[in-house]
């Protein structure tokens, strides 16, 4: 039954597209004929042969047409809800990043999250990426991570920096103190 309804919906969409194209062509041709002055503008509305009822025009009963319209509306509402949820997920990620890096809050993101409901979480893929970055930062910030960085540095370079710093401090002290 579901497959039949889908086929029927697809057929109705094709019919609607065909009727729309037919309507546009008829209007274009009749307007050109009117411009030529050949009396094409005296057509009656009843000649089109299209029934006034959209259900009959689609080749369905009134109940089928109402069901079709309801399905279209439900599908649109589902798409809109899913889109709003995705936008709220992205806003949640931005909020978390702003908190992490101590950036100013965005009212737009806050309102987006409130509109979608407070049960919005960061998407799983993005959460994994953020967690990996947090682990890497924790490793770098730990004493063990700092020691590993020292192993990677050149000892001559460290000595040069220390001597330069000591020399700068000595010169600054000599300028400030008259006894030295």
Image: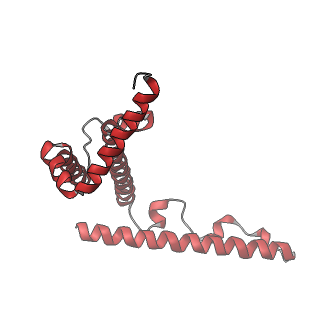
Q: Quadrant of the N terminus?
A: bottom left
Find the residue positioned furthest to the front. Answer: 179
Q: Nearer the viewer, residue 10 or 51?
A: 10
* Relative height, residue 92 to residue 156 (above, below): above
* Relative height, residue 79 to residue 9 (above, below): above
**Which residue sits at x=19%, y=51%?**
150
61 left or right of 39 in image: left
Residue 65 is situated, as x and y percent measured from the top left of the image, at: 39, 59
* Relative height, residue 24 to residue 123 (above, below): below
Q: Nearer the viewer, residue 15 or 148?
A: 148
Residue 11 is situated, as x and y percent measured from the top left of the image, at: 40, 73
Residue 172 is situated, as x and y percent measured from the top left of the image, at: 43, 31
**Which residue sits at x=32%, y=36%?**
99
145 left or right of 77 in image: left
**Which residue sits at x=42%, y=23%?**
177
Residue 162 in view, yes or no = yes
Q: Quadrant of the C terminus?
A: top left
Q: Nearer the viewer, residue 41 or 146?
A: 146
Q: Nearer the viewer, residue 5 or 56?
A: 5
- Quadrant position of residue 168: top left
Residue 90 is situated, as x and y percent measured from the top left of the image, at: 35, 47
């Amino acid at each position: 039954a579901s497959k039949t309804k889908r086929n029927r919906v697809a057929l109705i969409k094709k019919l609607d597209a065909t009727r729309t194209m037919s309507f546009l062509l008829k209007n274009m041709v009749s307007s050109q004929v009117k411009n030529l002055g050949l009396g094409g503008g005296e057509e009656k509305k009843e000649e089109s042969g299209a029934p006034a009822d959209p259900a009959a025009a689609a080749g369905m009963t009134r109940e089928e047409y109402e069901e079709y319209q309801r399905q279209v509306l439900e599908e649109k509402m589902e798409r809109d809800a899913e889109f709003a949820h995705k936008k709220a997920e992205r806003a949640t990620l931005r909020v978390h990043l702003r908190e992490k890096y101590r950036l100013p809050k965005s009212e737009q993101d806050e309102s987006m999250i409130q509109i979608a409901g407070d049960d919005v979480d960061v998407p799983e893929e993005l959460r994994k990426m953020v967690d990996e970055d947090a682990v890497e930062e924790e490793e770098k910030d730990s004493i063990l991570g700092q020691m590993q960085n020292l192993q990677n540095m050149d000892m001559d370079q460290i000595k040069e920096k220390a001597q330069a710093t000591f020399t700068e401090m000595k010169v600054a002290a000599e300028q400030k103190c008259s006894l030295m």
